[in-house]
Amino acid sequence: MVVLSDLPWTFTTKDALGRGVHPRDLYAWRDTGQVVELSRGVFRRADAPLATYPDLLAVGMRAPGAIVCCVSAAGVHEITDEVPPAVQIAVPVRAYPPQIDHPPTQVLRFAHATFELGLAQVEAAPSEFVRVYDTARTVVDLMRMRHRYGEPLAHSALHRAVASGRARPADIVRYAEALDVLGPVRLALDIVMAR
């Protein structure tokens, strides 16, 4: 018989069933508060250390191939104070988008050729990692989607990323060139560097 302590801190229903947990036991653990359901089919043991980013952890478990992006990634990298109303994740253009109701999730489709450009990880909980775009890629994504998220957010993120040393201007330019937004990014970067 599998006991709860045999399972990792965060696990899916599929993981639990694959280890021999009976569905009755899984839902009894949930109903008695021994596990918390972070999202449909994603559970976290009640004795687990606190998660820094529980919503990102839940979404990362539901959509392991997706990458946290845009304002959600900017929050992770501490280059914005804005909190998006939903966890923003990117999937390749032709990929089937995950259907996640809780936590609220916004799925964006990014080109397959540059999908993993700037890929990094964030420790969403102790020893549990989620895929996220690095700071430089996040800045470039916000600049290329400034019509959606606003010029002030994009320019503020760029300024904070460069001023804090979280992103090197050379990396920002390299990503901007690869993502075909070099002109606006270079202009904004020149203004930031002139301050």
Image (tube, rainbow, N blue to C red):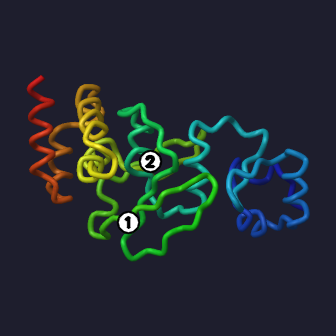
- Left or right placement of residue 160 versus residue 172 in this view: right
Name which residue lies at 87% across and 67% down. 22
- The crowd level at tag 2 (other Cα within 10 Å; few <14, some 14-19, many 20+) is some
Name which residue lies at 44% across and 38% down. 76
Q: Earlier in the sequence, mark 2 or mark 1?
A: 1
Quadrant that contains the N terminus: bottom right
* Residue 97 marker: none
The amino acid type of the residue labelled 2 equals Gln
Q: Position of residue 155 (x, y in %)?
A: 24, 36
Q: Quadrant of residue 108?
A: bottom left
Q: Position of residue 75 (x, y in %)?
A: 43, 38
What is the total number of numbered labels drawn onto the structure image?
2
Q: Secondary structure at mark 1?
A: strand
Name which residue lies at 76% across and 63% down. 16
Quadrant that contains the C terminus: top left
* Residue 109 marker: 1
Residue 104 position (above or below residue 186) = below
What residue is disc 2 on?
121
- Left or right placement of residue 53 versus residue 165 in this view: right
- Left or right placement of residue 93 versus residue 123 in this view: left
